[in-house]
Image (spheres, rainbow, N blue to C red):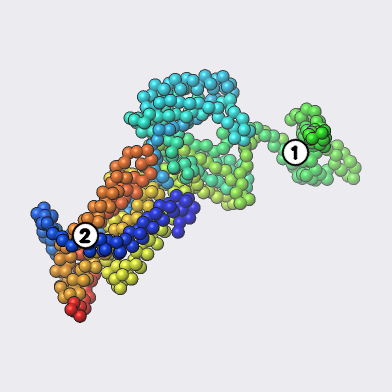
């Protein structure tokens, strides 16, 4: 049900889980009973002293918990509130950063450098970086100007191959490279990994300023860059105004022009004709080839010649020659390299790159806080884009998916229990699982990424299983005439084994993902950590909290069923 990039990345995973669970359901209802009828004809239950002690200890703890409900529930609620509170200060990211054996870097030489200077600096950088133990080899290629399709004299791209058994992470190697080249007379931008899935989300934080007047947009871009520059974690800010070209502005004084019966369009046309040097006249066809004929007007108009340029106007019903300089003002200014539009509205973008030691989500919150206090003029607007926008959209999609999943789970249980209250009790395992998942992320120091959010989505459908097993068996025992409290105790004793088995098998299966250190393992670590933390925490508390909630909420007497009937 998701949209956009979230759908493209995770639809296959969702379908795989859905199809495999559907297949396992069919097998468990058909193949497993058939095999059990033949293979389990002679089953001897071997006593386990250690597990029997665990069951007796659990029974004592459960009886104590049922008598001291507030003491048990209070810390659970406090941990839940604490976890929700910590979400605000947790780092967020679109995708976790991933290590690989490939890195890249881009060399930018000072303006005016020759190709020879660039090659010489490239050799110097390569010789210096090859002294780093974790680097296996480095290749350099000319950077190409995408607009002109030709190589640039001042830029060079590096492809860095790392050793398979490297001792440092890609981020640490990138810092070593930056440290080694910081005194060089050039700018070297290092990309820590060529497997960075976060690049799908856009680069860093972008502040998009929309409006009509270009001068006002430039002024706002400069102001905003100054506002966000002191924020810790912001490494580099670009406004699109770097290295601007010069332009000559000609502003018509309409009142003076009207004295001579001239319009802005007439003045523009006169100046345009004078400064135009080449005009396409016609095309000659010789054989199979076409040749354009260009008529050249000679040298272009200089600024002084422009001031002395005359245009014919009328005054007192007589034609007069009017100097351009008498009806226009001429000034020099900096021009934009391009004018961007979206939905017929002009915009400029202020882009901030984030230091690898800082989290884009936390830095983005500070940027948003600064922009909330920035006064925007009427007719202008400010939006946050880049990775922050992608994270916000993806997180919003996943939150809606989790809510929808919880609703589906509840409806399925209502149909199964033929009751509204029993499923409601079971649903309390979901906030317990979310608490465990968030605590696991905090303990391991991981960000709240789209991948880890997917772990919460998986938890919402998995953790209710233990609650269902517990509540369903309590209801069965009460239906035979057993008292509520004794039914709860007996359920705890008899169902602790399958509950622990199902939880442990899932936790152990997920541990391979959580502990993996192979290339690209970071992609699924968040999901595994959330699943393990949520399952471990919720399983332990399901054995205590769910019985307490059942005792508090299920006050209705059960109709006793005659088993013989």
In terms of sequence position, does the residue under pointer 1 or pointer 2 come before the other?
2
Height in image: 227 above or below 423? above
Is residue 65 visible in the rendered structure shown here? no
From the image, tell me which residue sits under label 2: 39
- How busy is the neighbourhood of tag 1: few (under 14 within 10 Å), some, or many (20 plus)? some
Q: Does residue 416 show up?
A: yes
Spot occupied by residue 418 in the image (x, y as percentages of width and height): 30, 73
Residue that lies at the very extreme toward the bottom in this rendered image: 565
Specify the farthest residue to the front. 38
Residue under the image location 81 percent in, 31 percent down? 297
In depth, the one of 79 and 142 nearer the eye is: 142
Can you name the residue that lies furthest to the right here? 318
Which residue is at 36% across, 31% downward? 164
- Front residue of 206 and 166: 166
375 lies above or below 497: above
Name the element at disc 2.
helix
Quadrant assignment, res 308: top right
The C terminus, quarter of image? bottom left
Residue 356, numbered label: none
Residue identifier under label 1? 328
For numbered disc 1, what is the local secondary structure? strand
Q: Residue at x 42, y 23 (%)?
A: 129
| Residue 467, percent from left and from top | 25, 62
Q: Position of residue 69 (x, y in %)?
A: 18, 63
Q: Is residue 404 above or below residue 143?
A: below
Decide: few, some or many residues near mark 2? Use Cα within 10 Å; few <14, some 14-19, many ≥20.
Answer: few
């Amino acid at each position: 049900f998701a949209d956009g990039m979230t759908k493209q990345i995770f639809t296959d995973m969702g379908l795989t889980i859905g199809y495999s669970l559907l297949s396992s359901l069919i097998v468990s209802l058909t193949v497993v009973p058939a095999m059990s009828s033949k293979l389990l004809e002679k089953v001897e239950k071997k006593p386990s002293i250690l597990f029997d002690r665990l069951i007796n200890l659990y029974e004592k703890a459960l009886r104590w918990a049922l008598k001291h409900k507030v003491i048990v529930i209070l810390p659970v609620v406090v941990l839940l509130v604490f976890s929700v509170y910590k979400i605000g200060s947790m780092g967020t990211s679109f995708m976790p950063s991933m290590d690989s054996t490939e890195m890249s870097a881009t060399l930018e030489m000072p303006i005016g450098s020759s190709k020879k200077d660039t090659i010489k600096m490239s050799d110097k950088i390569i010789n210096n970086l090859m002294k780093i133990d974790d680097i296996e080899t480095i290749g350099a290629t000319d950077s190409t100007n995408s607009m002109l399709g030709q190589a640039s004299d001042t830029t060079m791209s590096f492809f860095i191959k790392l050793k398979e058994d490297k001792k440092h992470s890609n981020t640490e190697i990138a810092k070593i490279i930056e440290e080694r080249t910081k005194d060089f007379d050039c700018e070297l931008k290092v990309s820590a990994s060529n497997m960075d899935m976060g690049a799908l989300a856009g680069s860093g934080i972008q502040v998009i300023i929309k409006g009509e007047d270009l001068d006002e947009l430039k002024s706002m871009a400069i102001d905003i860059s100054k506002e966000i520059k002191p924020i810790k974690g912001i490494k580099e800010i670009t406004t699109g105004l770097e290295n601007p070209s010069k332009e000559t502005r000609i502003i018509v004084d309409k009142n003076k022009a009207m004295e001579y019966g001239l319009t802005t369009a007439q003045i523009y046309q006169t100046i345009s004709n004078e400064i135009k040097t080449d005009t396409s006249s016609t095309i000659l066809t010789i054989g199979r080839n076409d040749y354009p004929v260009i008529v050249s007007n000679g040298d272009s108009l200089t600024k002084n010649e422009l001031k002395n340029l005359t245009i014919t106007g009328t005054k007192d019903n007589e034609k007069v020659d009017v100097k351009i300089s008498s009806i226009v003002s001429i000034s020099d200014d900096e021009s934009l390299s391009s004018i961007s539009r979206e939905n017929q509205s002009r915009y400029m973008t202020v882009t901030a790159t984030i230091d690898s030691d800082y989290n884009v989500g936390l830095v983005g919150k500070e940027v948003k806080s600064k922009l909330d206090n920035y006064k925007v003029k009427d007719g202008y607007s400010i939006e946050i884009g880049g990775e922050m926008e992608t994270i916000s959209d993806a997180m919003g999609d996943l939150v809606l998916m989790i809510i929808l999943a919880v609703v589906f789970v509840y409806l399925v249980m209502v149909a199964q229990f033929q009751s509204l209250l029993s499923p409601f009790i079971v649903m309390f395992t979901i906030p317990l699982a979310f608490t465990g998942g968030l605590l696991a992320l905090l303990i391991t120091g991981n960000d709240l990424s789209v991948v880890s959010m997917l772990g919460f989505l998986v938890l919402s459908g998995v953790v209710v299983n233990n609650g269902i097993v517990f509540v369903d068996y309590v209801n069965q025992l009460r239906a035979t005439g057993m008292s509520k409290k004794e039914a709860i105790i007996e359920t705890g004793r008899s169902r602790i084994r399958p509950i622990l088995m199902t939880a442990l098998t899932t936790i152990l299966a997920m541990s391979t993902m959580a502990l993996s250190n192979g290339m690209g393992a970071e992609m699924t670590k968040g999901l595994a950590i959330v699943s393990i933390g949520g399952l471990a925490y919720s399983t332990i508390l399901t054995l205590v909290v769910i019985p307490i909630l059942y005792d508090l909420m299920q006050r209705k007497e059960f109709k006793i069923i005659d088993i013989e009937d």
